[in-house]
Image (cartoon, rainbow, N blue to C red):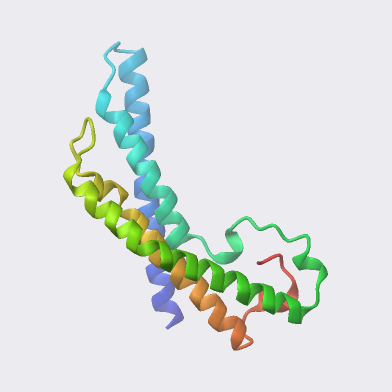
Amino acid sequence: MRTRLDWWQARADDVAVGLLTAMFLAFVLQITARYVINYPLSWSLELSLTTWLWTVFWGSALCLRHRDHITFDMLYNHVSPATRKVFGIVSSVVIVVAMLVSLPATWDWISFLTIKKSATLRIPLAYVFSIYLLFVAGTVGVYGLRMWRILRGQDESAQAGQGQV
């Protein structure tokens, strides 16, 4: 099972690399067109911004592990393992509930955006911002799994105090 998860993780990383490559190429093309040829391209800025948005949410939802995120752990590192478990469970519940509560409003907003298009590329904005739904689903999955692992005693960070809240 771990091999299959590793394969999917690698494919998610490949998509992130593709997004970063597209963003970089659009950026370099814009700089070259503007300052070398003196003919700015309007679409390359929009492509850069869209791929940046997708890279951030894709990477946060599917590429970063929980321990890769920035944490504020001064208090967390100075409490007992039992208290760390409570902190981990409470923070996971809060994150999952907040994401699930925001889901209907998010869905409504993205559905509304089907009538609007981006300024230059004319891409429906629902496509541009739909990545946020994947981010919500990924976040709920990651923190739901973390909560499950803490409750089963399988989360090392809640026991070892590795700065994970």
Is residue 114 toward the left or the right of residue 102 in the image? left
Q: Is residue 163 visible?
A: yes
Q: Position of residue 157 (x, y in %)?
A: 67, 73
Q: Quadrant of residue 119?
A: top left
**Furthest residue in direction bottom, as rendered:** 152
Residue at image point 36% right, 48% down: 54
**Furthest residue in direction top, as rendered:** 38
Q: Is residue 63 above or below residue 82?
A: above
Quadrant, the N terminus: bottom left
Q: Position of residue 102 (x, y in %)?
A: 41, 61
Q: Is residue 75 above or below residue 5?
A: above
Q: Quadrant of residue 149?
A: bottom right
Quadrant, the C terminus: bottom right
Q: Is residue 18 above or below residue 80?
A: above
Residue 145 versus residue 126: which sits nearer the camera? 126
Q: Position of residue 30 (x, y in %)?
A: 33, 24
Residue at image point 18% right, 36% down: 122
Is residue 131 toward the left or the right of residue 149 in the image? left
Residue 132 versus residue 1: which sits nearer the camera? 132
Q: Is residue 11 visible?
A: no
Residue 133 versus residue 68: which sits nearer the camera? 133
Q: Position of residue 81 (x, y in %)?
A: 76, 79
Residue at image point 60% right, 86% down: 151
Is residue 142 toward the left or the right of residue 71 in the image? left
